[in-house]
Image: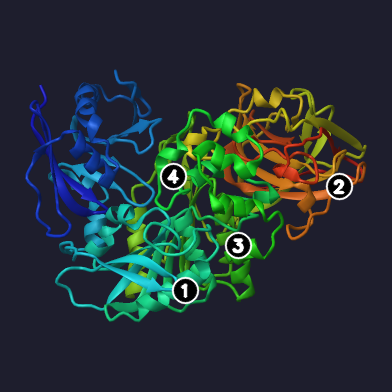
Amino acid sequence: MMNETKWDLFQSGIYSGHVRLSERGLVIALTDPFTGVEEKEKPADDALIARARGLTKINFGVLEDTIREMRPVIERDSEGDLPVGTAVTLHSGRRYEKKDEHHYIERNMKFPLDLIVDGGQIVGVQTPGRESESILIDPTKKALTILPEWEKSFPGPACTVKEKETVMIPMRDGIRLAADIWLPRGKEGPFPCVLVRTPYGRQDTAPGYLRFVQRGYALVIQDVRGRNDSEGEWIPQNCETEDGSDTLDYLAACDWCSGNIGMIGGSYLGYVQWAAAASGNPHLKAMISEVTAGSAFVDIPRRGGTLASGTLAWAFAVSSRRMDASKMVRNDWDEVLSFRPLSDVCTHALGYRVPFWEEWLRHDCNDDFWKKGDWYNRAKEAGGVQVPALIFSGWFDDDGMGTTQALDLTAEHPEGRRKVLLGPWKHSGNADYDLHGVPMGSNAVRYDIDLLFFRWFEKYLCGVENGVADGAPVEYFTVGENRWKTAENWPPENTKTRMLYLGGGDALTRFGGGTLLTRKPDAPGSDTFRYDPKCPARNIIDMSENELEVPEDYTKEEERGDFLCYTTDPLEEDVTVTGDARVKLYVSGSAPDTDLVVRLTKVGQDGKSIKLADGLLNLKYRNGFDEAEFLSPGEVYPVEIRTTKISCLFRKGERLRLTITSSAVGFIFPCSNTKEGFRSDKTQIADNTIWKGGDYPSGVELRTEQ
C-alpha cells in the first residue's frame, strides 16, 4: 500500500506548489505566480498533468507508477546495500540506476525523473533541463537537494508578477515589434531587465521565464520581426543586429528599467544575443548564451558551403507566422528530402510557399545577404564583444559551431567576464544521461545550471559580488571518464596538438585498411572513392527529433563503398582527446564540385564505431565562402576542415577512426557534383581521391590532454 506523501514543488529554487500521493491517487496544487496564492488541490487529470509538466518538465503522468514500482527496490537497498550501478527495469520499460546513496537516476530518457532516497524511502524526485531544474521534495529533506544553495543566494520570498503590458517597439525602419513587459508586483523600480527575443511566440515562451520576475527582474519577451504579432517580413537572422540594438535602446529609456539589460536563451534565442552584442549597444550588460546558432557558413544552414537538410524540419515549424512544432514530425522525410527542385520542396511538403527558404536558395555564396546576419564577423569588424558572457553548449549540439565562434570571439575576455560550460549534451542541453543509446555517464546532467544563470545576472545586472566569476572560467565533461573538469581557457591549457597521418593500405577496407599514424609516411599514396549523388550515405538521425549531431553507431554505414576509413592501432595507453580537430587533406576529384564529410569516431573493443565529432566542406569554397572556385580534374588541392568539439577518453585497447565520404543525407542535401551544387537535379558521379604520405601529409590534428 502506498502511504500518503506530500512533497513541495520548486522550480529554479522557487516554491511553486505541492503534490500529494496516496492510494486515492495523485493531486496537484500549483502556486499562481501573479498572486502568490496556492491553488486548491485537484486530482491530476490529463489537462492538469500536461499543464504541470509544461511548467516543470516533471513527468507527473508516470510519477505514481514509478514510485510504486521502485519502493520495494529502495527498501531492499536499505537492507542489503545494493552496489552503485545497480540497474532496475520497470514493467513500463523505464530504467533506473543507483548513482549513490541518495540518488537513483533514470537512464535512456530525456528529462529524466530522478529519485531522491533516504532511509529506505523515496523522499523526492528531480528533473534537470537546459535552463531550469524542477524538484519535488519532502520539506524535511531539502538538504539532499540544491535548495539550500538557492536559499543562501536568494533568501526571502519570491515576488509576485504584475500583469503584462504589451507594447509595439519601433525599429529604425518604422517596423514595430510586439513585446510583453512583466514587472514585479508591488515593488518600486527601476529594475534590471531580462530580455528574451524569440521567433517561437512570446506568449508560449513566457511561462518558463516568469521566474526572473519572481526574483525581482523586469522581463521583456519580444517576437522577432515577422513572427507572431510583430510586423515585417520573416527572414531568419537577417535583421537581428539592428532590431536587437533598437530594442535595447527603447527598453533602457523606460522609467522602470535601470539601464542594465541581460539576454538569455538558446539556439535562435542565443543567436539574437550575439547579433545584438555585435552592434556594440552599451545597454547590454550580460549574456547567457545557450547552444547558440552561429554564422550561416560556419554553422547551419550553410555549414561549410553545404545546405543543411536537417534545417528543413525547423524551417517547416516556422514556415507560418506562428510556430507549429507538429510540422517537424513526419513519416515521409526520405521522400521529402529527395524531392527536386529544392525551391519547390516546401510547396510539395506543406502545400504552400516559404519565402525565406526560396530566398536562401537564391544566395549561393557568402554575399551581402548572408553577411548581414553574420554576427561573428560583424563583431570582429567592430572590435569584438565586451559583454560578460556565460556560454553553454554540448558536444552533440547541432549548433555547436556557433558556440565555437562564441568561444573564439571571447577568448580574450578579461578574467571573470566569461564562463564556459560544455557538457555531453545534444541541442536540448542538460537533459539526458544517454544519447541514442550511447551512455554519457551518471554525472552527465547537472542540477545547478539555473542557479549559475541567476547568479550570473545577479553579478552583472545587479552588482552583487557573489563569487560566480571567481571559480574556474571553463567547466567541461569528459565522455568515458564520467567526470567534470575545470580549465582556465578553451581549449584547456593542459592540452597539446598531436598530428595523426593517413597511411596504410586501401582505406575502403575498414579493418587492415587505412591507418592513422603518429609519423608521416615517407612513401606517397592515395585512396579513391566513387560518390554517386543518386545513392548518398546517411547521417544517422531521426529528422522529426530535430537533432542533427547525435552520437550513433556508424559501423554498418562505413561498410559502404564510398567511405574511406583510417584507424589507429589499439591504443597502448589511455588517451583523452579534448577540443576540436583540424582535418588537413590533399584532395583531387573528377568533377567540378563535391562535398567532403569527415567524422571522428571511437571504435570500441566490440568493433562499434561511435561518432564523436564531424566537419563539412563544399570543395568549391576551399579558399573561402565569398567566391566559388571549381575543381580542375586531376589537380591536387590542400583543404582544412574544422570539426565540432569533444572531450572523450579513449581507453587502452580502443581505437580512434577518421572517416571521409561525400554525403550525409539528413544533415546536408547531396551535392550534385556539378557547378550548380546541391540545387541541381542533374548529377554526375565523382571519383574523389585523398592523397597521403610524401609531399601530401594528409591527416588530422587533435588536441590531447597531458
- Residue plotted at (60% across, 55% down): 491
Sequence order check, earlier mark of 4 and 2:
4
Whether residue 14 can be seen here: yes
Q: Secondary structure at mark 1?
A: helix
Residue corresponding to mark 1:
245
User: How many other residues sit within 10 Å of disc 1, few (<14), some (14-19) or many (≥20)?
Assistant: many
Question: Is 203 located above or below residue 573 in the figure?
Answer: below
Residue corresponding to mark 4:
428
From the viewer's perspective, tell me whether residue 130 is left or right of residue 682.
left
Label 4, label 2: how many angstroms apart (C-alpha)?
A: 39 Å
Identify which amino acid the numbered label 1 is placed on. Ser
Sequence order check, earlier mark of 4 and 1:
1
Residue corresponding to mark 3:
408
Q: Tell me whether circle 3 and circle 2 mark residues in contact (CB < 8 Å).
A: no
Label 3, label 4: how many angstroms apart (C-alpha)?
A: 22 Å
User: How many other residues sit within 10 Å of disc 3, few (<14), some (14-19) or many (≥20)?
Assistant: few
Mark linked to residue 585: none
Q: Picture quarter containing residue 151? A: bottom left
Residue corresponding to mark 2:
631
> In front of the other: label 4 or label 1?
1
> In front of the other: label 3 or label 2?
2
From the viewer's perspective, tell me whether residue 13 is left or right of residue 681.
left
- Residue plotted at (9% across, 55% down): 37
